Image: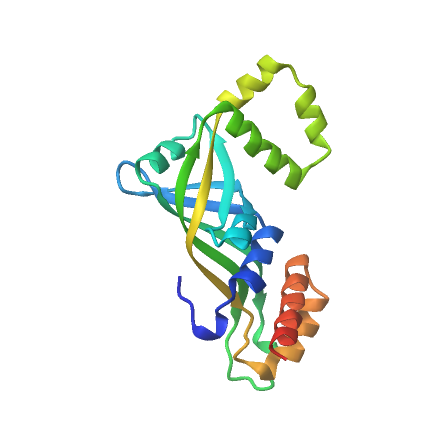
Amino acid sequence: MYLPAHFKGDWAKHAVPLMRADPFASLISTDDAGLPFVTHLPLLLNDEPAAEKGATPVLLGHVSRGNPHWRYLQARPQAVVTFLGAHAYLSPQVYPDLVRVPTWNYLAVHCTVEAVLIDEANAKDTLLKKLIGDHEPAYAAQWRSLDADYQRKMLAGIVGFELRVTAFECKLKLNQHRPEAHDATLRMYASGSSHQRTLAEWMVRLKDIQA
């Protein structure tokens, strides 16, 4: 993506918390006709192996077996994953002069990934338990209590995968290069929508990190 230097974010300080706060991602690869194929799905960032062993962080997820995306990943493992965080309109009213134009502020992470499919039953069960542990730990007991045949049927209906992150881009478009508008932007965003309030929090966070 287009990424001016003043909007560039760090992996640990910015990309990781963004992906964890907004885990609903877009997985993009090519279909058999060479066209982009997109699946919207939640992905769990598992960067503990990378922190412990210097290995590559991975994104964990699964799709329905009826979704052809897993076959495209099998044939062409390289793909792109995008995460879109908070975003909001920014009025030119925040500037002290009138020779300005509107813009749109946003937070985004793009990852280049290498897919490894997970289709063995026990491995998929382990994957699901990690996802359950992240989204609803209390559901784990209910999953374990389900009839074994039903569990097998549910597991057979999905294909899991690890998406190994080989490169990333993190964009924090918050008008960092327009300090004359920061105070007015913070006042506008702090009393606005949930997205605007999140952007205000990130503006403060970046200011504190850079201080």
Query: Residue 4 location, x and y as percent?
Result: 43, 72
Task: Write down the quadrant of residue 197 in the picture.
Answer: bottom right
Using the rendered image of the protein, determine whether residue 57 is visible from the camera's viewpoint: yes
Q: Quadrant of the C terminus?
A: bottom right
Nearer to us in this view, 41 or 103 = 41
Most distant residue in the front direction: 53
Query: Residue 174 location, x and y as percent?
Result: 56, 70
Using the image, determine if residue 163 lies above or below residue 182.
Answer: above
Using the image, determine if residue 124 lies above or below residue 173.
Answer: above
Instruction: Please count the marks in the image.
Output: 0
Query: Residue 163 location, x and y as percent?
Result: 44, 44
Decide if residue 133 is on the left or right side of residue 29. right
Q: Residue at x 67, y 66 (%)?
A: 201
Decide if residue 140 is on the left or right side of residue 61. right
Using the rendered image of the protein, determine whether residue 95 is visible from the camera's viewpoint: no
Decide if residue 1 is on the left or right side of residue 136. left
Decide if residue 88 is on the left or right side of residue 117. right
Most distant residue in the bottom direction: 97
Q: Residue at x 58, y 64 (%)?
A: 13
Q: Residue at x 54, y 74 (%)?
A: 175
* Coloring scheme used: rainbow
Nearer to us in this view, 181 or 51 = 51
Task: Write down the quadrant of residue 208 in the picture.
Answer: bottom right
Using the image, determine if residue 104 lies above or below residue 64.
Answer: below
Q: Residue at x 30, y 35 (%)?
A: 75
Query: Residue 168 location, x and y as percent?
Result: 44, 58
Q: Quadrant of the N terminus?
A: bottom left
Nearer to us in this view, 96 or 27 = 27
